[in-house]
Amino acid sequence: KAGVTQTPRYLIKTRGQQVTLSCSPISGHRSVSWYQQTPGQGLQFLFEYFSETQRNKGNFPGRFSGRQFSNSRSEMNVSTLELGDSALYLCASSSPFRTAEDEQFFGPGTRLTVL
Amino acid sequence: KQEVTQIPAALSVPEGENLVLNCSFTDSAIYNLQWFRQDPGKGLTSLLLIQSSQREQTSGRLNASLDKSSGRSTLYIAASQPGDSATYLCAVFSGGYNKLIFGAGTRLAVHP
């Protein structure tokens, strides 16, 4: 069974630009969560989607947004990039059931560098 | 507000030692606790998931215990090997649709 995949793996952008990251969950998983990892703040929850609906959102500005498609693939978008947005962005998928207590499986991440 | 703390922040040991990594959380009302491994620049690999009703889980040389009442979990690594070198993260789920709260991690180095 293929794991969680994320594309692209690396991105370099400049301040003010926008970026879109993609995540494909494990086959059959319908929940996708996004996290930001930085040396200073560690791993922080961005948002979670299930069946194309955002069910939960972390404490990030509105420049961070996401969506989920009918095939459970998810994208996150960051507009008007700032230097502080440089981070490893991780996506996780979990259970096909409508519960929130299941093991989460992470992708390899997208390394975003903002210059 | 749930907070997760991991001690120690870093650990360097010779090969073959048995290790204990500690994780504590402030709110005992959790659904589960998950231990992850992260190699430099890589994603997270799930090691063990402990449901709130369980006291421990084992996988190979790894054993994780959970004491909800005291807000603690430990990850025990037996007979450590250089390949175990990585950062180990614990995360708790205490509600809110798959929102994991992570500790800062323990950076482990096992030298031959």
Image (tube, coloured by chain):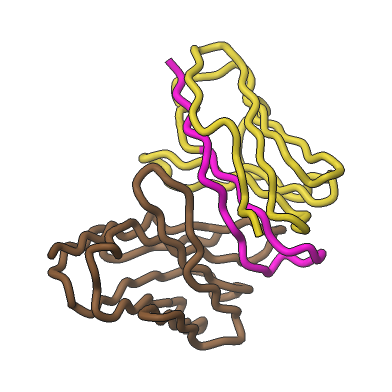
Chain colours: A yellow, B brown
- Whole-percent x, y for residue B65 in the image: 44, 83
Front in this rendered view, residue B89 or A10 = A10
Q: Could you tell whether A61 is left or right of B69 in the image? A: right
Is residue B100 positioned above or below A19 on the image? below
- Whole-percent x, y for residue B30 in the image: 60, 73
Is B27 within the magenta? Answer: no
Task: Tell me which residue sits at (28%, 62%) in the image.
Answer: B83
Is A91 within the magenta? Answer: yes
In the picture, the quarter occupied by the N terminus of chain B is bottom right
Is residue B74 positioned above or below B111 on the image? below
Is residue B61 positioned above or below A79 on the image? below
In the picture, the quarter occupied by the C terminus of chain B is bottom left
Residue A22 quadrant: top right
Q: Which residues are magenta?
A: A89-115
Task: Tell me which residue sits at (36%, 80%) in the image.
Answer: B61
- Whole-percent x, y for residue B110 in the image: 20, 64
Front in this rendered view, residue A22 or B6 = A22
Task: Tell me which residue sits at (23%, 80%) in the image.
Answer: B18
Q: Could you tell whether B93 is left or right of A41 in the image? A: right
